[in-house]
Image: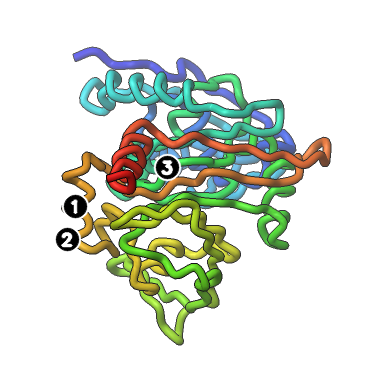
Amino acid sequence: MNDKIINTSVKMLTISEDEAGQRIDNYLLAKLKGVPKSLIYRIVRKGEVRVNKGRIKPEYKLQTNDVVRVPPIRISEKEQAPVSSKLNKVASLEKQIIFEDDCLLVLNKPSGIAVHGGSGLSFGVIEALRALRPTAKYLELVHRIDRDTSGILLVAKKRSALRSLHEQLRIKTVKKDYLALVQGQWQSEKKVVKAPLLKNEVSSLVRVSEQGKPSETRFAIEERYPIASLLRASPVTGRTHQIRVHTQYSGHPIALDDRYGDPEFDNQMAEFGLTRLFLHAYSIKFEHPKTGEEIRLTAPLDDNMKNILKKLRALKEK
């Protein structure tokens, strides 16, 4: 059995300002490409990784000028994850980058890929991007979108950019628009849904509840079809599954939503050829964290979604 040597000798790494603020486990995952998360935790807990000569926990947040001791690392063949599927995911994501400079990377995330590894998924968008940009010292998600939702995802390449964009999200100056195909005829007068949302921490399902957090989504009709409506949904708050639950609560669930959908409508859409949740983060507007200029970006729908809309338009012409 062949071992893979990741680190041949002890390394002493000094944390830059851009690298500060992240957890030591995430920092090591980015630095030590191909090392399983379980091994990262093992060398941290055993004290082989040290910060400023002292032992630390995996959740320790790095500070500027911290000195990190990284030990030699050897991975046995059985610990190495399959490479081919990962390489395919990495290669496909390169084509989905719609904007990139020294501060930011903006991705049109495909449906079916989680933004982060974990919860049984060893490989997510952020891990793929770190493999795609091995020289990037800093790559962190600015926000998240559901695994089955596609579309615009912001990734910060500098700590300062992350702070700026988080502040813009906090004060609600970032404008995000989604496209959602929902069941039936959405009422023209329903332009805002305000319904508090409560998440079940065990099942991760979200429901409307007076005990929930205040939640608001604005809606506009983009196109009507005999059996469905294409909506533009603009979330004012950013709760888990917010658009999916607000459309369901309004009596118009999103097509192929395996958690909040309508089985009869989903079967109908599947017969039309839809293979995924029809929810897409279509556009975003924000202030560039470095230049201050207004940035507006759009992400095209994938081929499956485009084909479904063509078929629905054809129904109108009959």
Which of label 1 and label 3 is nearer to you?
1
- Going by the numbered disc 2, the residue's amino acid type is Glu
Residue 263 image position (x, y, % from top left) = 18, 61
Residue 38 visible, this angle: no
SS state under label 3 = strand
- Going by the numbered disc 3, the residue's amino acid type is Ser
Question: Toward the viewer: 263 or 91?
Answer: 263
SS state under label 2 = helix
Quadrant holding the N terminus = top left
Residue 250 visible, this angle: yes
Residue 127 image position (x, y, % from top left) = 44, 33
The single residue placed furthest to the front in the displayed view is 318
Cβ–Cβ under 8 Å for marks 1 and 2: yes
SS state under label 1 = helix
The single residue placed furthest to the top in the displayed view is 2
Quadrant holding the C terminus = top left
Identified at 46% across, 80% down, the residue is: 212
- For label 1, the residue is 268
In the depicted structure, whether residue 54 falls above or below residue 167: above
Question: Toward the viewer: 68 or 188?
Answer: 188
Cβ–Cβ under 8 Å for marks 2 and 3: no
- For label 3, the residue is 150
Whole-angstrom CA distance, mark 1 to mark 3, is 21 Å
Residue 90, quarter of the rendered image? top left
Residue 93, quarter of the rendered image? top left
- For label 2, the residue is 264
